[in-house]
Image (cartoon, rainbow, N blue to C red):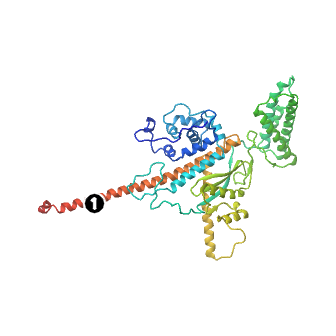
Amino acid sequence: MRNSRSPNQLMFDGFETEFEKWLEPDNRWVLLSQVIPWEELSAAYEMSLSAHTGRPAKDGRLVIGAVIIKHKLCLSDEETIEQIRENPYLQYFVGFTAFHKEQAFAPSLFVEIRRRMGPKVFASFEGSIIARLVDHQNPKTCVDDDHKSPPEDGEAVPCDGATPASADQETPTHQGKLIVDATVVEQAIRYPTDLSLLNEAREISEQIIDTLHPLTGMEKKVRTYRRNARKDYLALVKQRRPGNKKHRKAIGQQLRYLKRNLGHIEAILDMLPGREIPLSHKQLRQYWIIGHLYLQQKQMFDSRTRRCDDRIVSIHQPHVRPMKRGKQNKAVEFGAKLGVSLSGEGIACIDNLSWNAYHEGHDLPAQVEAFHKRHGHYPEKVLADPLYGTRDNRRFLKEKGIRFAGKPLGRPPKMSSAEDNINRRQRQQDYRERIPIEGKFGQGKNGCNLNYIRARTSKTSESWIRSIFLVMNLLVLFRLLFARVLTHMGRYVTAILQAQLHWFHTSTARQTDKLKQSPLLETAF
């Protein structure tokens, strides 16, 4: 059930609690809490909750704040709760008004939180961040008086010499730039090999047989040859560089062991007609997965190929697929593929998240329309690598009046050397402007563990990935907003100092004039 309490903390001078009085006002968590639009984020999170039934849910600010802390500091679920319990600044960040010695909530609740946070919730988060950024970039009021007080937290930052836009003024149809690219975020799985997958599937099948055997009433258990199968597996993996023939022979052995075990499981289940299958949900799921794995491996073994459709590379995470990327250090990556768009301000949005390999160039029209939906206008130009420069994409951008920053197709037209140099410099500048999205991927993978997703299911993994992008966008919002506030406060302080200096000079001149007109001064000389 939803929580009706407001996530915003009410701050009144002279009425602070003892918990708030000794907190440093310039602490990073205190400053970040003033930037985040808690009201909008909490409302978006509570969309997934029932309005009338169920137990009262945890406060939206507490839940979202815990997720931000977890991914900003790259902590586990348990360590995140412990850090909140021990750190008063983190407790202030999640909305506590007093220091709590007990846990904010059980660490296992993070799993349910990730299930609730779907793509619609994170899309609302992105919209709230963009709206907050637009409000500060286009303030409604402008202050020209140097003696005005500096802006409070959450107020619009005044601009210099600007006038508020009138209602009759037309908004531009094309504004800003859109940077698009794709990347793969890797799951935390063991590097898959055909032999290791078959050995793991064989061990799972043996565990299922051990569970079903007592229900058959037979005194002697069916033969699985598990000891011989284990010896055959270790005989190959202990070799430093086994040849292809030895490797193929070991795979064939494990396939035959697994086929025998699957036959025993089917025979035992046939002996229990009319009864509920005596296996847990986990074991039934694993039985279904190893059956598909056997069919795929048998198909590749018989056809002597290393490729098949929807190839399973992890028994515990069967949704993960291999991504052939052709990178210099990693030819194949295992995880989800993201189509990401980056605005000129640095806000990154996930436009497409797929567990299957696909051509990212087909995402460009949808990414342009998503940019128009978020910002209310189309970009002036699109920055992308040459893979996006297909004829269909160029035709689409031309119809929308958007320039594609890339080398044109076809034979180069005849032009003078001066025009050729200008075009070449323009393309180089466009390629340089595309670098920030590569930096965004580096920030996520090196700073927020975007290349090591430790969630188990596809839905929780997607929520994990989108949470990392939420944290990076909030850091961009924090940097841009406080840069404007500090700049305005610097101008305010400078104006005050100039006014005081002008008063000092004026006062000194008046005192000097009085001394010159004094009769005592004349008699003294």
Figure quadrant of the N terminus = top right
Q: Nearer the viewer, residue 210 or 282?
A: 282
Location of residue 227 with respect to 521 vertically, above or below: above
The image quarter in which residue 434 lies: bottom right
Regarding mark 1 in the picture, which secondary structure is present there? helix
Residue under the image location 62 percent in, 47 percent down = 122
Q: Residue furthest front?
A: 168
Q: Which residue is mark 1?
A: 506
Q: Is residue 449 visible?
A: no
The image quarter in which residue 296 lies: top right
Residue under the image location 41 percent in, 59 percent down = 144
Q: Nearer the viewer, residue 384 or 362?
A: 362
Left or right, 490 with reference to 378: left
Left or right, 60 with reference to 366: left
Left or right, 179 with reference to 260: left
Q: Position of residue 186 (x, y in %)?
A: 68, 46
Q: Position of residue 121 (x, y in %)?
A: 63, 45
Location of residue 107 with respect to 139 vertically, above or below: above
Residue under the image location 87 percent in, 34 percent down = 263
Q: Nearer the viewer, residue 363 or 164?
A: 164
Left or right, 500 with reference to 127: left
Residue under the image location 58 percent in, 58 percent down = 344
Q: Which residue type carries mark 1?
A: Thr
Location of residue 357 with respect to 258 vertically, above or below: below
Q: Position of residue 166 (x, y in %)?
A: 51, 61
Figure quadrant of the C terminus = bottom left
Q: Nearer the viewer, residue 75 or 501?
A: 501
Location of residue 97 with respect to 328 vertically, above or below: above
